[in-house]
Amino acid sequence: MRLKTYFNVWKIFGFNAIQENLVNRGSNILFMIGKVLRFSFSLIFLFLIKNTVSSFAGYTSAQMIVFFLTYQFIDLISQIFYRGTYVFSNEVRLGSFDAYLTKPINPLFRALTGKPDINDAIFMIPSLAVSFYIFNNLDISVTWLSLVWYLILVTNGLLIITAINILILSIGILTTETEGIIWIYRDLSSMGRFPIGMYMQPLRFVLFFIIPIGMMITIPTEVLLGVKPSFSIFVTILVGVGSLIASLKFWNWALKKYSGVGS
Amino acid sequence: MITIKVSNLKKYFKVYKKEPGLWGSIKSLWKRSYETVKAVDDVSFEIAEGEIVGFIGQNGAGKTTTLKMLSGLLYPTDGKTTVLEFNPWDRKPEFQKQFALVMGQKNQLWWDLPAIESFHLNKAIYEIPDKIFDETLAKLSKILDVEDILRIQVRKLSLGQRMKCEIIAALLHNPKVLFLDEPTIGLDVVMQKTLRDFIKTYNKEFGATIILTSHYMGDVKELCERVIIIDKGHKVYDGKLADIINKYARNKILSLTLENSITKNDLEQFGTVKSFKNNQATLIVPRKEATKIASKILNQFKVNDLNIEEVPIEVVIREIFGAKKIH
Amino acid sequence: MSLTVWTVIFTSNNSAFGYSKESMITYIFLVAFLQSMIIASSLNGLASRLYSGEISNYLLKPINLFGLFAIQEIADKIKNLLFLFLESLFLFLIFKPIIVFPDLKLFLLFLIWSFGGLILNFIITLLFGSLGFWSPQVWGPKFLFFMILDFTAGKLFPLDILPIMLQKIIYLTPFPYLSFVQIQLFLNRLNSQDILKHTVILVFWIFILGTITNKIWKKGLKSYESVGI
C-alpha cells in the first residue's frame, strides 16, 4: 500500500519534470544538443585513440571502449534518477527541506528522487542504441554467464552510486554546501571511464574502497570481458551493500544533527 | 480536549563564536569557543481543540523554534511535546497527515508550473482520495477566490496569490492542527485582511487548532483570543489578549479639549504631556490615579471634553519587551 | 579527463598523435594554465544577475559597468593564478615533469596571444551574459557553450588529432583562439606564416565580437531600464 503511494508520488515528480522541461523547452533543446555533442566528441576521441594506440596497460582498445560505455551507462542512470542531489543543499538553505520533513513521506526519498532529469532520460535512448551498436561491432568475446554477472554487478554498481548520492545529501544537510564535493565527485567518477587498475597507488586504493568507482564500473566490465577482476565478486558486492547501509546510517545521523536553518 | 501539550520545553543551540578579523579565523582553526544560545527555555502551555493562539515575540525570541519542535523538525533539548497525542519528533505518517506547517517566507510550490500541479503532488503524498481532493480544492479555492489562477505558472503570480495557493497546498489534507509562521508577511493590507478572514473561516468550519506567529499585531488582534508572549526563549505571558492591558499597562491616556487657553506648564503637574496644540492635549498618567487626576483637571480648568483611554496594545507589548519606555 | 587519458596513453606508449611525451605533458600544463587564465570567468553568472535585476544596483552608481566587470575579472584571474601556482608546484614536486620552453620571442608573443584570448573570452562571456536582458533561460546556451568549448578550444585533446574536415570547421569559430593556438605557438608547432595568419584572425574576432557585444549591450540596457526592474 505504501509502496504504491511512493510510486504515485514518484510518477508525479517525473510528470512535473517533463512539464517543466516543456515550459523551458528552448533551454532544454540546447542542453540536449550539448549532451549529444559531448557524447559524440568523446566517441570520436575514443575511436581516434583506438586507431592510433593499440594497447593500454594490458587492455586492448576495444576493451577500453567497453569500460567507457559502462561508465556512460551508470553515470546516465544516476543523472536520470538522482538529479535532485545537485540542488539539495540549496533546498536545505532555503528551508524547503523543512517542508519535506513535515510530510508523511520519507524525506530521503524526496531529496533523492524529487527531480528526475528528463533530458538525460531522453538522451538515454540514442545513447543506449549507439552503445549497443558499438558493442556489437567490437572485437571482444562475451559469454552468457559473464553477461549475467555483468548485469548483477552493474546493479550492485547502482547501489554504490545510490550510496554516494545519499552521502552527498547527508553532507548537504550538515553543511548546506555541497557544490565543491559534487565537483570532486564528478572528477573522481570520470576517472572510471578507464579501468581503475591503471592508476597509481594510492589513487587506485581510493577509487576502489573510499569512493568505490572501481567497484561500480571497472569490476563489472572486467567480469564481462572475461578478464580476471581486480577484486573478487564477493568483495565487490560486499562493498556495494555495505556502502549503501553505511550511507543510510550516515543519513540518519545527519538528520538527527540537523537543527533547522535559523531559529 | 487538549490538542497540544508542551511542558518544560527547551531548545539550546551551540553557536560557535569567532573573533573578528583574519587572525580570529585562523585562531578558530584550533581553538573554538562555543556559546549556548537558549532559543527556547522552559516553556509550557496547553492548547485546546479548536483554539487559535497567537505567538508574539521579537525576532529570535524562539517562536519559530517552538513551532519547529511542534512539527517534529527540531529535537528538543529537554521537555515534552505532544500534538494530537503524538510525539512530533517521531514524524509518524499518521501524525503528519493531520497537521500542516506554513511558513510565510518559504515556497513549496513548483515555481515553473501552475499551482494545481503542486496540489496533485500533495494529493499523492497525503494519499487523498480523488473525491475528497476535488471537494476540498473546490471549497478552498472558492473561499480564497483563486479558481482562475490555479492554472497559471506560479512564477507569474503576485505574492498574495502565491500565498493563497501556498495555503491551499497546506490544507488539502484537511489538517486538524495548523501552524502558521508569519502567514501575512510582505502582503498588502487588503490581502492581509483576506487571509485573516480565511483563517477565521477555516478555524470555524473545520474546528482546526491553529497556532499563528506574526509581526503584525493586526493579525493577532483580529484572530486570536489567546496569546502567548515569548521573549528571549521564555514565556512571559499566556492568556487573553485583552487582559494584557490590565496586567501590564502602567498608564492611561487622557485626552482633553479645553475651553480657554492654558499653558503647557499648567498641565505638566498632572502627568507627562504628550501633545499640546490648539487647546487640545494628551496626557499620560499613572493607571491607578487616572480617575483622580481627571477629576482634578475638571475642577481646575474649563474642560469641553475629556476621555480616558487605554494604551494601545502594541505599546504595551513593546514595553514588555523592554524596547522603549514611552508610557 | 584530459590528464587521466594522456597519462594512461603514455604509460604504454612513448609518442602518440605526433606528440612526444614531453610535449604532451607541456600541453597539459598549458591547458591548465590557460584554462584558469582565459576561460575561467567570474562573469558566468552574469545573465542570471542581469535577469534578477541585481545589476540595476550598479547602474545607479557612477561607475562604468564594463570597467567594473573587467576589474572583477582581473581580481578573479589573480586569485586563479595564485591557486594555479600552488597546484603546479605540487604537481612538479610529484611528477618532476620536463616542460619544453620556447625562445624568448615566441614566449612574449605567447603572452600577448594569451592576453588576446583573455579579451576574446571576456567579450564572449559578456555576449552570453546579455541573454539575461531578455530571458531567464540562460543555462541552456551556457551549457552548450561549455560543451563546445571543451572540445574546440583544445581543452581535452589537441585539435590536430581530429580529422582534417572537423579541424577546418572548428577553425571557422573563435574557440581555438581561446587556448589551442596559444599552445601550438608555445610548443613551436607553427611556422611564421601561421603565426601571422592567427594573429590577424585573433584581432579580427576581438574586433567583430566586440562591436556586436557593444551594440547588444546598448540595446539591452535600454530595454532593461524601460522595464524598470
Image: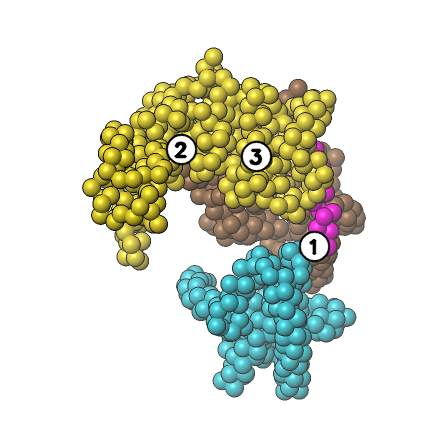
- Colour chosen for chain A: brown
Shade of chain C as shown in the rendered figure: cyan
Residue B4: % across, % down = 45, 19
Residue at screen point 38% across, 36% down: B312
Chain shaded yellow: B
Mark 1 and mark 3 in contact (Cβ < 8 Å)?
no
The stretch drawn in magenta includes residue A12 = yes
C-beta proximity under 8 Å, tags 1 and 2: no
| Secondary structure of residue under mark 1 | helix
**Chain for disc number 3:** B
On residue A27, the disc is 1
Q: Which residue is mark 3?
A: B195
Magenta includes B66? no
Question: Up-down: is A180 above or below A99?
Answer: below
Q: Secondary structure at mark 2?
A: strand
Q: Which residue is disc 2 drawn over?
A: B56
Whether residue B269 can be seen here: yes
Find the magenta span and give its range. A8-28
**In the rendered structure, which amino acid carries the disc numbered 3?**
Leu
Query: Quadrant of residue C206 in the image?
Result: bottom right
- Look at label 1 and name its amino acid: Ser
Asked if B52 appears above or below A39 in the picture, the reply is above
